[in-house]
Amino acid sequence: MQLTYKYRLKPTKAQLATIATHLELCRRQYNYRLSERFRWWESTRTPVNACPLIASIVPIEEIYQNIPLTRVQTRDGRKKDESGNPVTRKGDIFSNIEGGYVQWQTIQLADLKNTKKLFPDYKALNSQVLQDVVNRVETSFSNFTTPDKSGHRRGKPKFKGFHYYKSFTYPQLDNLDIVKDEQNRICINLAKIGQVPIVFHRPIATGFKVKTGTVIREADGWYIALTLEDKMVPVTVAEIQPTDENTLGIDLGITNYVYIYNGERVENPRFLRKSAEKLATLQGKLASRIKGSKPWKIIKDKISRFHQFVARARLDFQFKMAQDLLSKCDVLVVEDLSVKNMTRRAKPKTDVENGSLVYLPNGQAAKSGLNKSMLDAAHGQFANILKYVAWKLGKNVLLVDPKGTSQYCWNCLNKVPKELAERWHSCRCGESLDRDENSAKLIKKIGLIHESGGGTPSLKKALAQREIEACSWAVLR
């Protein structure tokens, strides 16, 4: 099992300058290595209508220019065969090109020696930290070029500006030293930086070993995130049979952040909305300052700290809410919302008048306000927190398909169409209650439905179950 503990660093002025320099060197190396990958990508990929399918538009000599075709093993490999002998030995020759594709990660890792020769500043940087930069490039570019199990690819990697590259990682911290210095301060020993004072607010769990450490720059200072691992502790998810007594159904919304099926509700704190006026004032002051000046940097720092405060307040609220909900039940049923799809722009509406294309009002202005409120609520983040807290408490979170949960009656499962502005549910079966309360009860009802085929519980399965029960009742009569 792996855990991540985050601690605040209290570096000295000299250490602050060193850490900032290391981060800037990592950022520059990241952008350079990414540019190498893009040059190769652009020279070997062209549109189908731009070149013949049987020939490259760029000469082969230029494609493989300055790329070593082979590499030589500099030491015996760590992997060993059944006899205990190294699988790869010093002096073995390997190809850097397989099937026409360049093994960029291997080439760039080997080229770090030349980087230190050409730019001596990199000698002050820990070698493993520098290697992790290349691994980050490999990860981001592989996510862009290689589809996942669903056939989707990530977006194109971006070059990182000063404010967008915020961390560097020590991949191996097995021999981490947390000691007290001459001034009786608890310090963490980081290679090439020294003993950095740390706010050691909680000890490392017994049996866990530190694997990696990531130094992070945030608005209010520097932090380090330690990844802990204990292979003896299994990662298990509680399997609890949901019943009417041990299960709680909730509906997530904008007006009411959480609406419980029994009528309890928690209002949306709207952290960003309530802070918008103060944030707008700071943004106005920032616009009146000369960009890059000292007053401009002061105001910009205040804005960053304010955004950090809002994010932390939201996170604290969500953790407390998750603890409170899971203390009332063993199984929590919640919608599996796709916030990314729900916050997309409204589709354009067009018409043709007098032979020309005309764009019609599509409600995007109102949709923008709704999107902002949904992102402020951060329901996706809350769902992940619910899963984490449930895992720690040995409980279970059951996700159901959200399709139709606001348009059907929980009692009779008949469709009751409602617009978004309609907040009251009235059904011909006699049910009359708040729209969100009806959704919470329906979500719980869907979660209690089990089928041998498994899969995600959904309203469709609930309707199918109702049909089966109706047919069975008709046969018995």
Image (tube, helix red, strand yellow):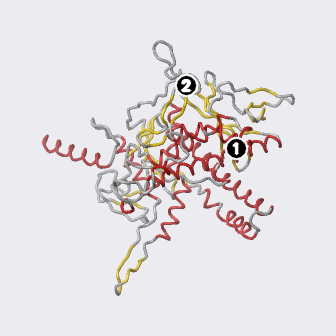
Residues marked 1 and 2 touching at CB (< 8 Å): no
Q: Is disc 2 surrounded by few (<14), some (14 to 19) or many (20+) residues within 10 Å?
A: few
Secondary-structure class at tag 1 = helix
Taking depth in this image into account, of 248 and 167 the one nearest to the observer is 167
Q: Say if residue 394 shows up in the picture.
A: yes
According to the picture, the residue beneath numbered tag 2 turns out to be 91
Residue 366, given in percent of the width and then of the height, sits at 49, 69
Taking depth in this image into account, of 103 and 272 the one nearest to the observer is 103
Residue ID at (61%, 39%):
111
Q: Is residue 269 left or right of residue 435?
A: right
Asked where in the image residue 421 lies, by quadrant, the reply is bottom left
In this rendering, the answer to whether 207 lies above or below 276 is above
**Looking at the rendering, in which quadrant would you find the C terminus?**
top left
Residue 160, given in percent of the width and then of the height, sits at 62, 53
Outermost residue to the front = 61
Residue 124, given in percent of the width and then of the height, sits at 74, 38
Q: Say if residue 258 shows up in the picture.
A: no
- Which numbered disc covers residue 5? none
Mark 1 residue type: Leu
According to the picture, the residue beneath numbered tag 1 turns out to be 118
Outermost residue to the top = 83
Mark 2 residue type: Gly
- Total numbered circles: 2
Outermost residue to the bottom = 354
